Amino acid sequence: IAGRAAWDCTGQRLDRYTATTWMRVDDQVATVRQRIWVDGEPGPWFTTAAVNGIVHLAVWEDGPLPKGTELAAQYEVLDAADGVVAQDALPTESADAGGCENGDVEIS
């Protein structure tokens, strides 16, 4: 897994969260999808297809979101029949995605 995540902040207010992820996947994987949870509410799924065992997924959440807003990420890895593929590399339940406690952040 490789990628980039960025939290664009004004003070501790989140203006925009963006993330891209590159992954190598098994042949049985047809799609990978991710959604962002905001304060416990799920957002839409961002979905991408596997091509020759590689997946590139891009997600974002636009703000502004106030100080203290909780962001979480959730993934699903699916086969060609939209069945869930068992894996342990990505969180399948919502997992903390960080925030603006320390201002702008970028992870590459």
Image (cartoon, rainbow, N blue to C red):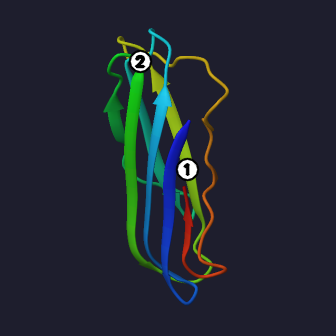
At a point 49% along the width and 24% down the height, the residue shown is 24
Farthest residue, direction bottom: 11
Residue 87 against residue 93 in the figure, above or below: above
- Amino acid under label 2? Gly
Relative to 75, is 9 above or below? below
Q: Nearer the viewer, residue 99 or 24?
A: 24
Residue located beneath label 2 in the image: 53
Residue located at (54% from left, 43% from top): 74
Q: Depth check: 60 or 108 in front?
A: 108
Q: Earlier in the sequence, mark 1 or mark 2?
A: 2
Left or right: residue 91 versus residue 82 is right
Q: Position of residue 107 (x, y in %)?
A: 57, 60
Please indicate whether residue 16 sits to the left or right of residue 3 in the image: left
Instruction: Describe the element under mark 1 as helix, strand or loop.
Output: strand
Inspect the image, locate mark 1, and give the three-letter code of the amino acid beneath it: Ala
Quadrant location of residue 62? bottom left
Residue located farthest toward the front when viewing the structure as drawn: 108
**Residue on which disc 1 sits:** 73
Which quadrant holds residue 29?
top left
The x and y percentages for residue 88 are 67, 26
- Dividing the image into 4 quarters, which one contains the N terminus? top right
